[in-house]
Image (cartoon, grey):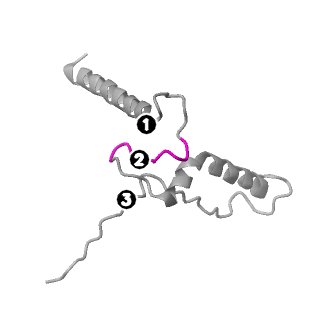
Amino acid sequence: MNTTSCDFALRTVRNALKLRHSVKKHSGGNLLTEFTEKTPLKNLASSALVPENAREDILQFKQKGQERFHEFVQERLLNTSKLSVWDPLKKLKLKTFSNLMEKPRFLWVRR
């Protein structure tokens, strides 16, 4: 094994331990407890707090996805369905950590 792959493996382990420590710290010392509605959500990479309007989407993404799946099956896959599988499907636009940050806007000025 060369030095570069060893360094990478060590750095990965250290990062995993840091992440585990952070989760343990913010979950009351028990890794098995789930985050509750009262826990402030933070982006682990930037430590930015998640706005209230995105909180529900992040905490309930699994339920919302399951609901959409059941709607898809009911509306498109059953013998009694009126829509085709190939009909356009409206996206489920959930707010996530990646699309919460404001994008910088630049004004282009011609000289």
Q: Which residue is drawn at the image coordinates 54% and 32% (left, top)?
A: 33
Residue labelled with disc 3: 101
Q: Main secondary structure of the magenta part?
A: loop
Q: Looking at this view, is 7 or 36 the one in front?
A: 36
Q: Residue furthest top?
A: 1
Q: Name above or below for residue 2 compared with residue 83.
A: above
Residue labelled with disc 2: 42
**How many neighbours does mark 1 have within 10 angstroms: few (below 14), some (14-19), or many (20 or more)?**
some
Circle 2: residue type: Lys
Compare marks 3 and 2 and give the one earlier in the sequence.
2
Q: Looking at this view, is 47 or 66 the one in front?
A: 47
Circle 3: residue type: Met
Part of the protein shown in magenta = 36-46
Comparing labels 3 and 2, the label whose residue is closer to the camera = 2
Q: Position of residue 29 (x, y in %)?
A: 46, 28
**SS label for mark 3:** loop
Q: Residue furthest bottom?
A: 111
**SS label for mark 2:** loop
Q: Give the number of the disc on residue 10.
A: none
Q: Looking at this view, is 83 or 63 the one in front?
A: 63
Q: Position of residue 73 (x, y in %)?
A: 75, 51
Query: What is the CA distance from the residue labelled 2 to the residue labelled 1?
Result: 10 Å
| Residue 88 lies within the magenta run | no
Is residue 91 shown left or right of residue 2?
right
Is residue 77 shown left or right of residue 95?
right
Q: Quadrant of the C terminus?
A: bottom left
Compare marks 2 and 1 and give the one earlier in the sequence.
1
Q: Looking at this view, is 53 or 73 the one in front?
A: 53
Q: Which residue is drawn at the image coordinates 81% and 59% (left, top)?
A: 81
**SS label for mark 1:** helix
Residue labelled with disc 1: 26
**How many neighbours does mark 3 have within 10 angstroms: few (below 14), some (14-19), or many (20 or more)?**
few
